[in-house]
Amino acid sequence: MIGVGIDEAGYGPTLGPLVVTSSSFQFKEPRNLWQALAPTSRQERKGKPYTIWIDDSKKIKKGKNGKEQLETGVLAFYLTRAPFPENFGDFLLGCDVDLKRYENLPWYADLMERKLPLFGWKGEVIEHGRRVEKALAKAEIEFRGFVTHPVNAREFNEGIIKTNNKATFHLGNFKYLVSSVLKREPLDEDIYFVCDKLGGRDKYSRVLGELFPGRVITIKEEGSKQSHYSIGDGKRTVEVRFMQKADSKSMAVALSSMLCKYIREIFVEQFNKHFQAQKPGLKATAGYPQDARRYLDDIQDLVENLSVPKEWLIRSR
């Protein structure tokens, strides 16, 4: 049985990527992962020494050493499947990212060569990874890895042109993650997806019908708090739940939330460094609409002289 949590970061900003991620676990029966892995991780802000905080990324980011805690959490789980990544590019490759999508974006030059960890201490991260691996084994749970999809502004704008609807485009990214997970997991393994509510809707049967053409989709529940579906997909059963505040109810979703935020923070930091190097004293931006307007006014001359179209830099919506 595979349990998968899906989340996103950066849906609203004007600058920087939209990042969507899935985190997958294999177990014999549905488990509360926070409880099963309690010796090494926690949901609360404060807890026992040597535990990592796995929760809504917004909460963690606001906390003390927020970026370091995001990095430690996601790398600890990553290390249960792979060696410590030499750099950010290697880490993204381990999360199924096609690095060629960023080669012609000058503000991300040298991004993939940045050494990890960026915010913490390598020895501490490795120790947390060792402890998580031991706890997973004891609980008979396997971390199956991340699939992440950082959508740059060029891809975002092309998607909006194609769909003419931001919510529809966003649902397309959800379908990309689901398809990626289905392809990498055994055909006879039941899979359970949990995701936050997407696109401001309660009904997703049409979206799932596009993902599973010709399959019977059973609607178990459709409402403001949760929409739950079961799909007969050959030898396996696939269940999908869209839930309000899913990152507070599913550790897999919370972990995806953390990876999304971590990746976006690194992309935006590199973005700022690129333009600050050309305009000393430029105040950094997080990319959200109001401050993005200020930032773009400040770098107007640089934008006009870009070697690539400005649509590769600035989102249309």
Image (tube, rainbow, N blue to C red):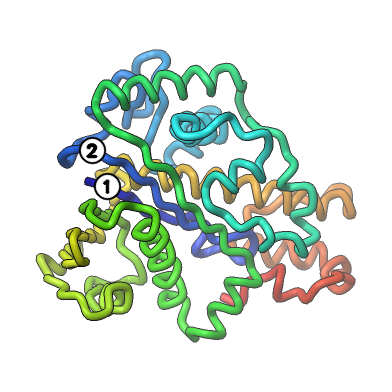
Q: Amino acid at mark 1?
A: Gly
Q: Is residue 45 above or below residue 130?
A: below
Q: Amino acid at mark 2?
A: Phe
Helix, strand or loop for disc 1: strand
Judged left or right of residue 283, residue 161 is left
Residue 253 image point, x, y percent = 34, 47
Within 10 Å of the Cα at label 2, are there few (<14), some (14-19), or many (20+) other Cα atoms?
some
Q: Is residue 309 visible?
A: yes
Q: Residue at x 54, y 78 (%)?
A: 159
Judged left or right of residue 79, residue 27 is left
Residue 15 image point, x, y percent = 64, 63
Residue 31 image point, x, y percent = 19, 37
Q: Which residue occupies the foreground of this view, 125 or 16?
A: 125
Write down the residue under mark 2. Answer: 27
Mark 1 to mark 2 CA distance (whole Å): 8 Å
Q: Are marks 1 and 2 in contact (CB under 8 Å)?
A: yes
Write down the residue under mark 1. Answer: 3
